[in-house]
Image: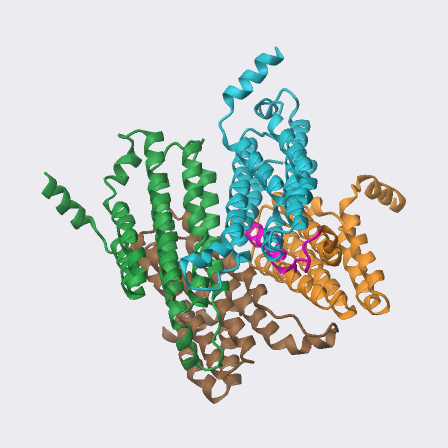
Chain colours: A orange, B brown, C green, D cyan
């Protein structure tokens, strides 16, 4: 089974998720730019989610580029990932409707956290299918970022009940973790391990 | 006529169906995770439908992979399948709005049942176009699962008026039928036939 | 300029149009299958539109399959076609909200009629780009169906103000015109011309 | 890293943006064609946006056709472009709900202006990745249209507060700038520079 159609299907679903999120945004009541202030939180949540889903697409792109073979397990792990990503528009709307209530803020972390788990499962099943010495296994490496993201979401979700700002900051930390170019960090970590 | 563009179009439509279903989900009234309880039934219907549509995509993927030729009849049978799949978001919304009323629960089975018929028609037209000895005809085989699914939907739809739980359980049985790896079952059945 | 990306973009837009139409359908008020009766007109409009858009996709598929070259004019004629097709979900919603009022019924014909014009313009620009002796020019032929469809819409739109049923019947006649296999008709017409 | 999947992803997102805009259009209250008059402004905004997004797709198509290599910076500049394009349906809805209020009219220019910036950034990062003598760098050339569009949006946005008609006219001028075939203009400009 080759990777072409899986890539095409994933691209399709991710492109749709990233685009239909905009349908969930409520427009301001008034007609002035100042009225956008009331929409600022949900627009930031939209930006955050857009970058998040964009990162998933980007990383998925690189991972499948190095993948030679897939099997049924990869298809289902990938569908698990897409399922949780597909709920992002739902939690954005809930965040907006509830005024960033603690429960909705926690739900946002749960959905993104389970998407991270889905991504990790897809990685594992691809490595299991291609072997630990395959190019894709070496490209994925130790994946401390993936494990770290899941850990940060596990911490952030209960913190949403203490203060939703703690949770939101941790959600942004996860994104920065992936955005910041990290070759030097990885090399430093490897050196400290050696 | 080759299969490339049919695959791409089907992937596109299925990717959109699986993703826009989320637009039909109503967010909870309150802002607490407990308030998700009221959304639990529709979230389960969403999960059920996501897996169902994912299964169709997966099986369609394998079937077209083995297909060499298609004709106008295949295109129309495939469009019939896509038509019924496209109504899944509609019945999910109806299920939610009506609180899983018997009629909406029956409609869910009718839509999925007619999608099964569409899938069977697509199989038949592909076999008719490629010949009974073609690789795709052998890959499809006796398709007892397809026939069994249609039969289960025929039973489940009237049962929705007795109890919607009967119907929902049967809808889940159809999914399990497709999820459980079945090589051993098929072999056992073949042996009992021999 | 080759046809690959134009086909992919058109497939994408058509796949989305055909799928998001379902978001425009209002679910029945009640929870019984009988309550679907109130949704019957709009479901029929949905079916009509699904077949119509499916026919456009099918014919576009065949036309571009035979096309060797495209230029800027083809891109814009194709975008004109997609623009009018993209308004189909809008007129379906209007039909539903207005209870199939004459104006909305006429608007449905105007949108489909201008999509027909867009298709004819795409054909002309492809022939202009590939030459009158190119395979695609011969595959398109005299296109009496395209001209006939536009003529039927021109008749149907004002008739919607006399009786919306007249208009709806003519809209269905256009679909049947395209659905019925017509090789014999074409050959008969050619013979009568000779 | 090759351009195939970036093209496919961009095509997907743009196809979805151009199509879901229709979901933001409110249908007329009445059932007569005259009642469309009240929808005329938003239908014109829809047409304007459809042509605008179509132009982006068309130009993106040509630019990536000439591109040999992309890197991480190109991916992110492209995602920046897609982010602002994805907000077009949001501002169309706001324009409609606010009756073309100055703030919403300005927001429309801000979103399109930042999309122009995103397009320019994508161009720059592609040239940086392929070198100033690469075919794509020569195909892009001096890009006076891109710079001119950004300048026009910078002028139009504050003018929306003087009169929304000034702003709307400038938005249309940007479109005409791109629609009008310009080889002669470019050549004339080049000659006047020489």
Main SS category, magenta section:
helix
Residue B171 pos. (x, y %):
50, 76
Q: Residue furthest right?
A: A192
Find out whether residue C64 is within the magenta segment. Answer: no
Q: Can residue A63 be seen in this view?
A: no
Q: Quadrant of the C terminus of chain A?
A: top right
Residue drawn at x 36%, y 73% is B194
Q: Which of D11 and A174 is in front in this view?
A: D11
Q: Residue furthest top?
A: D194
Q: Which residue lies furthest to the bottom in this view?
A: B162
Q: Nearer the viewer, residue C102 or B24?
A: C102
In the image, residue B105 sits, relative to residue D122, either above or below, namely below
Q: Along the horizontal axis of the image, is A68 left or right of B82?
A: right
Residue B166 pos. (x, y %):
50, 84
Find out whether residue A26 is within the magenta segment. Answer: yes
Q: Is residue A29 visible?
A: yes
Q: Along the horizontal axis of the image, is B113 left or right of B132?
A: right
Query: How many marks on residues?
Result: 0
Q: Give the range drawn in magenta.
A: A9-32
In the image, residue A7 sits, relative to residue B170, either above or below, namely above
Residue B185 pos. (x, y %):
47, 72
Residue C179 pos. (x, y %):
27, 56
Residue drawn at x 11%, y 40% is C193
């Amino acid at each position: 089974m080759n990777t072409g159609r899986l890539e095409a299907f994933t691209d399709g679903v991710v492109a749709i998720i990233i685009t239909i999120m905009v349908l969930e945004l409520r427009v301001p009541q008034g007609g002035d730019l100042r009225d956008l202030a009331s929409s600022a939180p949900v627009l930031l949540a939209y930006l955050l989610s857009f970058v998040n889903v964009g990162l998933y697409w980007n990383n998925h792109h690189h991972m499948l580029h190095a993948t030679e073979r897939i099997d049924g397990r990869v298809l289902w792990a990938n569908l698990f990932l897409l399922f949780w990503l597909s709920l992002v528009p739902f939690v954005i709307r809930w965040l907006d409707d509830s005024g960033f209530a603690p429960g909705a803020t926690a739900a946002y972390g749960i959905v993104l956290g389970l998407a991270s788990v889905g991504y990790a499962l897809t990685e594992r099943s691809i490595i299991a299918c291609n072997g630990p010495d395959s190019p894709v296994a070496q490209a994925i490496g130790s994946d401390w970022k993936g494990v770290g993201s899941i850990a940060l979401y596990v911490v952030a979700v209960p913190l949403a009940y203490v203060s939703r700002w703690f949770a939101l900051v941790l959600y942004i930390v996860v994104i920065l973790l992936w955005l910041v170019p990290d070759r030097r960090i990885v090399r430093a970590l490897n050196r400290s391990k050696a």
